[in-house]
Image (cartoon, rainbow, N blue to C red):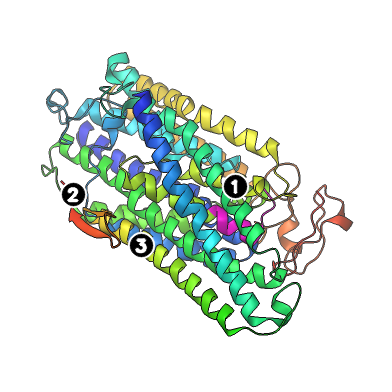
Amino acid sequence: MSLELLLLILVIVTAIAFDFTNGFHDTANAMATSIATGALTPKVAVTLSAILNLIGAFLSVEVALTVTNAVIRIQDASGAPRPEFLADHGHTLLLIVFCGLVGGILWNLLTWLLGLPSSSSHALFGGLIGSTLAALGFGGVNWLGAGAKIDGVLGKVILPAFASPAVAALVATVGTWLVFRITTNVAAKHRETGFRWGQIGTASLISLAHGTNDAQKTMGVITLALIAYGVWTDTTQVPLWVKVACAAAIAAGTYSGGWRIIRTLGKGLVEISSPQGFAAEASSAAVILVSSHMGFALSTTHVATGSILGSGLGKRDAEVRWGVAARMVMAWFTTLPAAALVGALCYWLGSGIGGYPGVLIVLALLLALTGVIIRQSMKAPVHADNVNAAWSEGAVPGPDAGATIGNGATLGNGVDAANATVSPDASAPATLDA
Amino acid sequence: MFPLFATAVAEVLIISLIVGAGLPALFAAGMRAYAYGEGGTATVGGGSRHLLGKVVGVACFALVILVIALGLAVIVSSGFGYHVAFDGMWPTFAKKH
């Protein structure tokens, strides 16, 4: 097997793996509030979201081949690799993309371990920026774009990261305030069940939109690699098997749940009721659809987090845990540089050692760190049965939480047992004093 | 680029406020009307049944479903390379260039 063929295979496999992490990282964006308020049981929620992501991924016939153009300069405007990369079966381009994907995957896994919702596209872009910096230097990165339109790292990544949570939070605050204002004289039980239906509808929209947007990015990356290697030439179509593989990967990832992040968003940030949940989901759906309709895509993660925060701000006596919010904001600002650092290190390793050993060492690094992170996560697992347990310090419920929830029994998780009765059914809301 | 970005954000904010906060408000209004129509234990104060309340409530819910369907249309059509425009009352679909 030639080195370039090995690289191509690794790019395809890591891209699909990244797509999987993208799925489980983002389940929370659509489903966290529905799970927290009991509108859907955890299993039903992730199944619904996975199916909609799968459908969404197949719905798009547009080719997101130019996805890397927003941040780096390895493709021309049509999406084909720049000619200087084509000489040696795209060796340099494949190594850049491979190392970028490694950076994206590792950052996604680490933030998942910490239960932090961070943007998967920022992780991917960060990884690619890092490996490109290492390979081509400062000029290889599209920092500012041409100036005539919103482009480059500044326009497509940094500015939206500041703007989107603020916009979403404002919309959700207004929505939540209106909802409570309008329904003050509706009986609480009536209100609680009614809003759950609204929540399911809007959450489904977000899942579908996610499938159409995010799976496309991975399809674009794989197709780019195939063109660079020289086994595909059409810049207007994605090979069918690529589409099937990416759709399946994002759906499988979504189904696997990313429970740690669902827990942070659904239980950690704000104690959420179903009117708030509906206002948050409606805000997220509106901001995501309106912005992507205007050709100005915002990160689903930033929008969803902002919306949930806003749903806490809009309700008078709601509790917003600012410590959790601050941790999330930290994660947002570190995502791009951290993934970039990993991407750059991998490229230096891969090209510095060179040849087969270099590539295989990067692969070994990816597998080893993935193993470590998964081992760590096993120590305090979060799953469908304990995802809604009462929130105490830290994102992860205690080791025996899963066993006791579901009988409405008390939790011994550093929480005063008398104050922390958890019921699986939100119609009998949990009392939380933690 | 900054003015361009600010304009885009302002547009997203205004339209999102109308749709994203308006939709829950409409749903809430529907719920309030329906509860008024149902009377009894559905409202905090109690009260008798009112047919008009139920009709208004159902109309609000139908409008909410319509808006969600429109959102669906936007997602599906953009996936197939079409752009939905809202020039008149009704959405029109045109091939993107």
Q: Are marks 3 and 2 in contact (CB under 8 Å)?
A: no
Inspect the image, locate mark 2, and give the three-letter code of the amino acid beneath it: Lys
User: What is the chief secondary structure element of the magenta stretch?
Assistant: helix
Observer-nearest residue: A359 or B8? B8
At horizontal 55% and vertical 59% (from top left) the residue drawn is B25
Is residue A279 a member of the stretch shown in magenta? Answer: yes
- Tell me the quadrant of the picture where the N terminus of chain A can be found: top left
The residue where tag 3 is placed is B70
Kindly indicate the quadrant of the structure image that contains residue A305: top right
**Mark 3 vs mark 2, CA separation in Å:** 18 Å
The residue where tag 2 is placed is B96
Is residue A271 a member of the stretch shown in magenta? Answer: yes
Residue A117: x %, y % from top left: 54, 42
Q: Chain of mark 3?
A: B
**Mark 1 vs mark 3, CA separation in Å:** 23 Å
At horizontal 30% and vertical 54% (from top left) the residue drawn is A245
Q: Secondary structure at mark 1?
A: helix
**Mark 1 vs mark 2, CA separation in Å:** 34 Å
Q: Chain of mark 1?
A: A
Inspect the image, locate mark 1, and give the three-letter code of the amino acid beneath it: Thr
At horizontal 37% and vertical 25% (from top left) the residue drawn is B3
Q: Which residues are magenta?
A: A270-280
Q: Secondary structure at mark 3?
A: helix
Disc 1 and disc 2 on one polypeptide chain: no
Quick one: label 1, few (<14), some, or many (20+) residues within 10 Å?
many
